[in-house]
Image: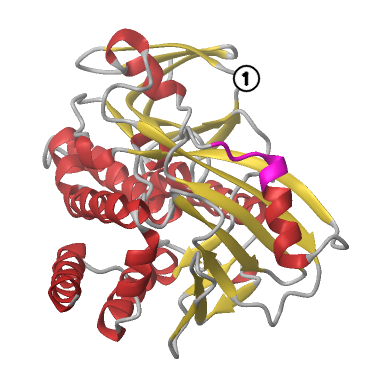
Amino acid sequence: MKIWDAVVVGAGPAGCACAYDLASAGKSVLLLDKSDFPRPKACAGGLTMKTVRALRFSIEPVIQQKVDRILLESRDSSRIPVGRRRSICVMTVRAELDAFCLTKTIEAGAVFQRIRRIDSIAHDEEKVVVTAADGVLHARFLVGADGANSQVRTMCSEGGTSEAGWFRKGLAIEANLRRDAHKDDLVFDFSPVMSGYGWIFPKRDHVNIGLYCIDAEEVLNRSRLSTYITQQFGDDVKTEDFAGQYVGFGAAKHSAKNDRIFLVGDAGGFVDPLTGEGIYGAVMSGQAAASAICAQLNHRATARETFISRTKDLRENLQIAERIATSFYADPQRGFRVMKNPLLRYAVLKNYADGLQLTGLLRTTRRLSLHRSSAS
């Protein structure tokens, strides 16, 4: 009976980030996914520069375009261009990115296996047992990186429910337009969704367009997205690859309680509710889980304590992002007016592209809001 150092469920950015670091450290790691790669994945495919730097390897072969300017659009049709000399983010096609990252992870020494489903998860103080349709797996640690609808989270939550008090979902729906996109701006449009935004992401030979909402109860569907596409590009564009995807929030309200099982990426609620950015949180939380597992296997510290410590800053930023998102989406026009201030605009761009402790951004936002209130 083989006992893996870790079994990682889900071979997206979070799972690969975790498995890559474990394999690079010489640990035995089995990476599971229900799909073969490349596989279609609903995702705009934009990676901020902080995400690019966090990855352990260059993704230059799958970068389609680099972006140094963002266009913000409000409900009153006003626009704010935000740019800088260095790149803000890079554009990829998510299916290509995931396949590339998986290849790199296998090259580092991880073993990949496709599974049809997981039937049960059991654990004790020494190991975790995963019973899958394809057999029984034994591991010292288990990492759930299987998305917003995580089976690992559901099976390991009290009462067997994935919505365990701390976790909630947002929703995104997208499509692709086949056209030359080299000169198009990257757009965040706050007019088409009440608690979110529409986006337009330029790629090498197409445009990815979609709608994002922090409240999964708001109806986002193909008809609504089609209407938005027509408003932006007219009726004569070829639209394809419609897809929807839940995103996971709540990591700020959750702390690992299990010594052997960790949740990362969307499964652990590491999506930024303000921007909808998920890949950065996926990579960082996946690497944190790997570090935690290595710490215990190498007898340096317990995995649970290390994971909590390694994700502390990330969780704090997500907590502040949650507060800012609640305020901003309650009155986007007010937030948009505040964004006209160059100092705040710089801080928002800096956080989005490079990472910034959001406590400073929150203080700046409050000062500007108070100043505007007193002036009026």
Name the foreground residue: 165 vs 132.
165
Looking at the rendering, the stretch of residues picked out in magenta corresponds to: 219-224
The residue depicted at 31 percent of the width and 43 percent of the height is 290
Name the foreground residue: 164 vs 60.
164
**Is residue 365 toward the left or the right of residue 283 in the image?**
left
Looking at the image, what colour scheme do you see? secondary structure
| Residue 193 percent across, percent down from the top left | 52, 51
Residue linked to disc 1? 116
| Residue 240 percent across, percent down from the top left | 80, 50
- Which quadrant of the figure has residue 337? bottom left
> Does residue 40 show up?
no
Q: SS class of the residue under badge 1?
A: loop
Which residue lies most toward the front here?
A: 376
**Is residue 54 toward the left or the right of residue 225 in the image?**
left
Name the foreground residue: 161 vs 226.
226
The residue depicted at 47 percent of the width and 32 percent of the height is 217
Name the foreground residue: 61 vs 335.
335
Numbered marks: total: 1
